[in-house]
Amino acid sequence: AQSVTQLGSHVSVSEGALVLLRCNYSSSVPPYLFWYVQYPNQGLQLLLKYTTGATLVKGINGFEAEFKKSETSFHLTKPSAHMSDAAEYFCAVSQISGGGADGLTFGKGTHLIIQP
Amino acid sequence: DTAVSQTPKYLVTQMGNDKSIKCEQNLGHDTMYWYKQDSKKFLKIMFSYNNKELIINETVPNRFSPKSPDKAHLNLHINSLELGDSAVYFCASSPVGSGLWNEQFFGPGTRLTVL
């Protein structure tokens, strides 16, 4: 079984400050890891993903995440927050099954608030 | 040119009714999914379909039934609606088997309200 824990249901940062959203996962096999963003009343948009290879992954809108196997973590960061970053962020994990058609297991989400 | 589309966007109905939500993807993907997002924004997978074959059914009540008339469509039928079914339902698709496993593309969601 796999699971995802996102620390902090709400994170508030000032505009221009560092954004750090925490994600820890549990998986019995090497995972695929994802960060999705959901803007109000919209669907989910993929920010970035880790499958194999380089452990530092760069995504859209200046976000990046680092896969740390020893810590079972995949934290999301952005050096300088922008007002438009205010949204709900979801970490998700998947693993390859025999059929390859696994769904994603999501964390409970972190609501990012940007203060002017 | 919408990749994954859902209709309707909003659905308000009475308890006990039967309703359907439609999903279409024009990405040529092999697998489609339905997720439920509850009032606390928790997302949980309900179903996935690969080549018209049900792959996952995550202990969803049998009042919910996915139907896939072709590879590009996966509709969600719900019978005897209950108050607890109120949620946002997301459709997604994925190019499974192409080396891009499990990168899922989501539709805009359907907000279902059961009165």
Image (tube, helix red, strand yellow):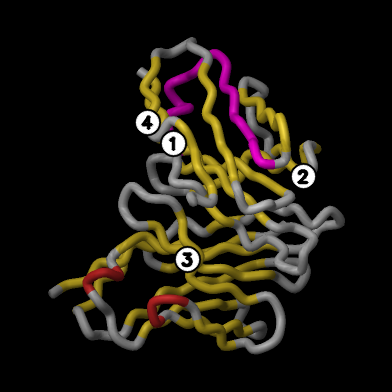
Residue farthest to the top, as pictured? B16
1 and 3 marks in contact (CB < 8 Å): no
Residue farthest to the left, as pictured? A116
- Residue A95 is situated, as x and y percent measured from the top left of the image, at 73, 63
Q: Which residue is mark 3?
A: A6
Q: Amino acid at mark 1?
A: Thr
Have a look at marks 1 and 3 and say if they share a chain: no
Q: Which residue is mark 1?
A: B110
Identify the disc placed on residue B70. none
Q: Quadrant of residue A50?
A: bottom right
Who's the residue at 67% across and 70% down the image? A32
User: If you read the primary sequence from the N terminus, does the residue marked by circle 1 or circle 4 appear first?
Assistant: 4
Q: Which residue is mark 4?
A: B10
Distance CA(mark 1)–CA(mark 4): 6 Å
Q: Amino acid at mark 4?
A: Tyr
Distance CA(mark 2)–CA(mark 3): 30 Å
Q: Quadrant of residue A13?
A: bottom left
Q: Amino acid at mark 2?
A: Asn
- The chain letter under disc 4 is B
Region rendered in magenta = B72-88
Q: How many marks?
A: 4
Q: Which residue is mark 2?
A: B50
Q: Nearer the viewer, mark 4 or mark 3?
A: 4
User: If you read the primary sequence from the N terminus, does the residue marked by circle 2 or circle 4 appear first?
Assistant: 4
User: Is residue B73 within the magenta segment?
Assistant: yes
- Mark 3 element type: strand
- Mark 2 element type: strand
- The chain letter under disc 1 is B
Q: Quadrant of residue A84?
A: bottom left
Who's the residue at 78% across and 37% down the image? B52
- Mark 1 element type: strand
